[in-house]
């Protein structure tokens, strides 16, 4: 039996256009779901990046699709779902929500110490919570708030990117290193304070045009980043630490950037210890517009194969899991489910990075596979 797409696609999937990747017996192939049909695009474009750059998802002449059962659509036998991203760079914007800004300051002040976090959180929320929520980054009002916080000894590099003119944009993972629906996601075994980050990520072509969006889990090690912002690479980029999917929902007449701007993303974590955590992120509370984050990402850089940009999250878990006052951290076996009505469902199981499936298909192996399939000219 194939994967039950009805469990992961949004309820209006028959009206939408969805671009993804599947593993076949021959290798990875881009697929498109449009008007209830699934098309294997590998004979026309060997990568998702190529589909987007050439605009093949808009091609009305696509033929030989598989008609999916409207009531119980399934991925055909012999196909398994991969991350919907291949040759695109994967970037992420951080501290784009007020709550996440406060939490990053807590990490910094606590130096990654869970025991100190609760007291610092209460003080910061009391002092700057309402002010940081109302200010627009980069404005005169933001500069005035910055001056007050500096005078009170409360300024932070995280507040700089939260309300200053320049957004934080970093590289989340290498090309081809992201994982998709149903895969394991990894946290380092030497991390004692970490969490999922349920987000929306936009797909952008080489011209800087946002062409679609998907769900993502920007897995984060809060203790590492809290010890020093210079450890951001170790906090963010680890084996299986980036999950995307289930498909890229492409912009069309029924779905566009305004749907991203107003989306609500919910998340649940269910542990083998019966612990349950739930949360929500509302894109209406983002401090910087998605289009502005994309503009800043491209201000001094080109992406000839396009890129994906995580937009950040409102979600910052503080619910105690074990010891009172020590908040939440992952345990191996946690099942993380991220969902949004117009994007579908992204589910992954947490393991230690060393136990996750090794990343072996890099650019060289990817190109070798295409060469063996005589698809290099479709790249």
Image (spheres, helix red, strand yellow):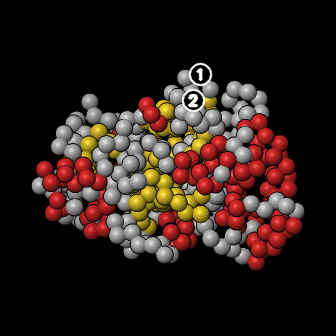
Q: Residue furthest top?
A: 273
Residue beneath disc 1: 273
For residue 318, say whether it is visible.
yes
Residue at 33% from the left image edge and 54% from the top image edge? 86
Indicate the secondary structure of the residue bearing disc 2.
Answer: loop
Quarter that holds the N terminus? top left
> In terms of secondary structure, where does tag 1 sit?
loop
Mark 2 residue crowding within 10 angstroms, few (<14) / some (14–19) / many (20+): some
The answer to whether residue 43 is left or right of residue 155 is left
Distance of mark 2 from mark 1, alpha carbons? 9 Å
Say whether residue 92 is left or right of residue 227: left
Image height check: is 53 above or below 65? Answer: below
Q: How many marks?
A: 2
| Residue 345 at least partly seen | no
Identity of the residue drawn at 83% across and 64% down? 149
Task: Name above or below for residue 150 compared with residue 34.
Answer: below
Depth check: 72 or 221 in front? 221
Rendering coords of residue 146 (x, y %):
79, 69
Which residue bears the numbered disc 2? 331
Q: Give how far across and how far down residue 207 sits, in percent.
A: 39, 74
- What x and y, as percent, mark residue 10? 43, 47
Q: Position of residue 155 (x, y in %)?
A: 78, 62
Q: Residue at x 67, y 48 (%)?
A: 226
């Amino acid at each position: 039996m194939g994967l039950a797409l009805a469990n992961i696609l949004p309820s209006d999937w028959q009206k939408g256009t969805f671009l993804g990747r599947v593993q076949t017996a021959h290798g990875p192939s881009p697929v498109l779901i449009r008007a209830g049909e699934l098309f294997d695009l590998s004979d026309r474009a060997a990568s998702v990046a190529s589909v987007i750059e050439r605009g093949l998802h808009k091609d009305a002449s696509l033929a030989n699709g598989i008609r999916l059962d409207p009531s119980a659509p399934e991925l055909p036998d012999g196909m398994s779902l991969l991350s919907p991203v291949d040759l695109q760079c994967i970037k992420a914007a951080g501290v784009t929500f007020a709550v996440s800004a406060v939490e990053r300051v807590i990490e910094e002040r606590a130096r990654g110490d869970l025991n100190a976090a609760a007291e610092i959180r209460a003080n910061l929320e009391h002092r700057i919570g309402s002010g940081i929520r109302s200010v627009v980054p980069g404005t005169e009002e933001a500069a005035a708030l910055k001056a007050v916080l500096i005078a009170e000894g409360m300024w932070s590099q995280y507040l700089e990117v939260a309300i200053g003119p320049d957004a934080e944009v970093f590289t989340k993972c290498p090309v081809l290193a992201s994982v998709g629906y149903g895969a394991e996601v990894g946290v380092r075994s030497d991390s004692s304070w970490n969490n999922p980050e349920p987000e929306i990520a936009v797909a952008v072509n080489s011209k800087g045009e946002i062409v679609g969006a998907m769900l993502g889990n920007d897995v984060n090690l809060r203790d590492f980043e809290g010890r020093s912002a210079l450890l951001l690479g170790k906090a963010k980029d680890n084996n299986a630490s980036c999950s995307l999917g289930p498909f890229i929902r492409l912009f069309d007449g029924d779905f566009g950037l305004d749907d991203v701007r107003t989306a609500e993303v919910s998340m649940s974590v269910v542990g083998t210890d019966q612990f349950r955590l739930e949360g929500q992120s509302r894109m209406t509370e983002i401090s910087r517009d998605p289009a502005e984050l994309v503009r800043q990402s491209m201000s001094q850089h080109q992406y000839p194969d396009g890129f994906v940009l995580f937009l950040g999250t409102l979600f910052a878990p503080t619910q105690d899991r074990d010891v009172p006052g020590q908040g939440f951290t992952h345990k191996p076996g946690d099942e993380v489910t991220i969902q949004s009505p117009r994007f579908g469902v992204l589910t992954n199981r947490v393991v230690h990075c060393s136990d996750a499936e090794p990343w072996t298909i890099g650019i060289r192996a990817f190109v070798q596979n295409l060469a063996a399939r005589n698809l290099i000219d479709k790249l």
